[in-house]
């Protein structure tokens, strides 16, 4: 077996131990004579997986008591629609901090369902920075303020969050959830597609505070209503069982690593090494975002020509470093270094970057 260093932006690398545990349990889950994905979602074996996954999230992320933890289908993209459907009152609107393509998509859905308003946008500079508190124009009537904590495509990340004048703050944390310690109580809702930091595609985590949940509109279709999933503890219908199970194994791995503070320390080390290599390359590798907004999860850079970028990607691939192509909308190089990417992967990549620079 030979596993490469996988820098894919999502779905992305998972902890080897989680994959191995899944492999070892796949044919006969804890003596049941079947796999967990062949088990009823109402059986005690799956109930234990669900309960433990919630408990691990609660412990690792220090989620206070007044939040519900839900596992839903439809990806983070369905949340873009469910949030305004549930939480913008008739005739009302919500505010969006637009820091990239995902935020734009979230704003678009708000506009289809009710009304979305731009509280701030960094589009004037190709999304290379993040609006701060002073940049925000918050509507006193806004039902909530929505932001994207980490911009997977443009390579920016909020390391501290802006103040939103006491409004409900809703965050799409799809690409940096559980990568660093966050004060969850700042947020009325956090959601994340699992396929970057938490597990495979197919399950979305929603962490929803009771006071925001209480404002939900009546008349929302059953499956699109948070109240349904709160009432059913994510078992109203068949939940994404495989995704939840792999998430459990991934969270167990995170706990074994020492929890969020330990992961944050490693993620910072990885990002520091990568950006330092970039900054010391005399302009050979040029970061695309303002230094204070740099993401620890997705580092974006350009080389001097597209030919050189293509050579970088193919030579890296030959060296066992895959998934480094920037998003099709922006080009260049993107280094996705989620929790499961070990420091050794970044060391190998930065050595490769130095060799490649010397060669070209
Ligand atoms: C990947 C991603 C999404 C989309 O997630 P899906 O689960 O594919 O819908 C949304 N927001 C951010 C920040 C992402 O990185």
Image (spheres, rainbow, N blue to C red):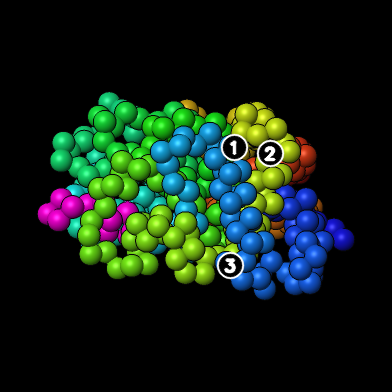
Number of numbered labels in the structure image: 3
> In this orientation, which residue lies closer to the viewer: 359 or 333?
333
In three-dimensional space, the C-alpha distance between marks 3 and 1, rounded to whole angstroms, equals 25 Å
Q: Considering only vertical position in the picture, is 63 above or below 3?
A: above
Q: Residue 255: which numbered mark, if any?
A: 2
Question: Does any portion of residue 11 appear in the rendered image?
Answer: no
> In this orientation, which residue lies closer to the viewer: 64 or 135?
64
Dot 3, crowdedness within 10 Å: few (<14), some or many (≥20)? some
Residue at 15% across, 50% down:
92
Q: Quick one: label 1 or label 2, which is nearer the N terminus?
A: 1
Viewer-nearest of discs 2 and 3: 3
Residue at 67% across, 30% down:
262
Q: Secondary structure at mark 3?
A: loop
The reply to whether the magenta stretch includes residue 297 is no
The answer to whether 271 appears left or right of 146 in the picture is: right
The answer to whether 90 appears left or right of 74 in the picture is: left
Dot 2, crowdedness within 10 Å: few (<14), some or many (≥20)? some
Magenta stretch in the rendered image: 80-92
Q: Quick one: label 2 or label 3, which is nearer the N terminus?
A: 3
Give the dominant element type of the magenta stretch: helix, strand or loop.
helix
The reply to whether dot 2 and dot 3 touch (C-beta < 8 Å) is no
Quarter of image, res 125? top left
Quarter of image, res 26? bottom right
Viewer-nearest of discs 3 and 1: 3
Dot 1, crowdedness within 10 Å: few (<14), some or many (≥20)? some
**Relative image position of residue 204 (x, y in whole percent):** 49, 56
**Relative image position of residue 321 (x, y in whole percent):** 73, 52
Q: Considering only vertical position in the picture, is 199 above or below 159?
A: below
Quarter of image, res 79? bottom left
The residue that mark 3 highlights is 41
The residue that mark 1 highlights is 60
């Amino acid at each position: 077996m030979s596993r490469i260093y996988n820098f894919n932006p999502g779905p992305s690398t998972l902890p080897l131990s989680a994959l191995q545990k899944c492999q070892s349990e796949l044919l006969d889950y804890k003596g049941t004579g079947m796999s967990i994905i062949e088990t009823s979602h109402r059986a005690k074996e799956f109930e234990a997986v669900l309960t433990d996954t919630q408990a691990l999230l609660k412990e690792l992320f220090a989620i206070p008591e007044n939040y519900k933890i839900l596992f839903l289908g439809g990806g983070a993209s369905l949340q873009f629609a469910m949030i305004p459907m549930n939480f913008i009152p008739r005739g009302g609107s919500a505010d969006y901090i637009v820091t990239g393509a995902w935020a734009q998509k979230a704003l678009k859905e708000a506009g289809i369902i009710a009304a979305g308003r731009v509280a701030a946008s960094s589009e004037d500079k190709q999304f290379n920075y993040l609006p701060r508190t002073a940049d925000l124009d918050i509507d006193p009537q806004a039902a909530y303020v929505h932001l994207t904590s980490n911009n997977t495509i443009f390579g920016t990340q909020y390391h501290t969050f802006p103040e939103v004048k006491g409004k409900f703050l809703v965050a799409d944390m799809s690409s940096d959830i559980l990568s660093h310690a966050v004060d969850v109580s700042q947020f009325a809702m956090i959601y994340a597609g699992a396929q970057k930091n938490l597990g495979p595609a197919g399950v979305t985590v929603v962490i929803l505070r009771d006071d925001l949940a209480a404002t939900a509109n009546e008349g929302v279709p059953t499956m699109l209503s948070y109240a349904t999933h709160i009432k059913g503890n994510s078992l109203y219908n068949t939940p994404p069982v495989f995704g939840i199970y792999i998430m459990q194994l991934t969270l167990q791995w995170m706990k074994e690593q020492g929890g969020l503070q330990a992961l944050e320390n490693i993620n910072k080390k990885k990002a520091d090494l990568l950006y330092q290599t970039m900054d010391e390359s005399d302009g050979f590798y040029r970061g695309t975002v303002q230094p204070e907004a740099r993401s620890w999860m997705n580092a974006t850079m350009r080389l001097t020509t597209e030919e050189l970028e293509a050579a970088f990607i193919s030579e890296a691939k030959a060296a066992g470093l895959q998934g480094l192509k920037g998003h099709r909308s922006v080009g260049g190089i993107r280094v996705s270094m989620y929790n499961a990417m070990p420091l050794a992967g970044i060391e190998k990549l930065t050595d490769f970057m130095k060799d490649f620079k010397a060669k070209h």
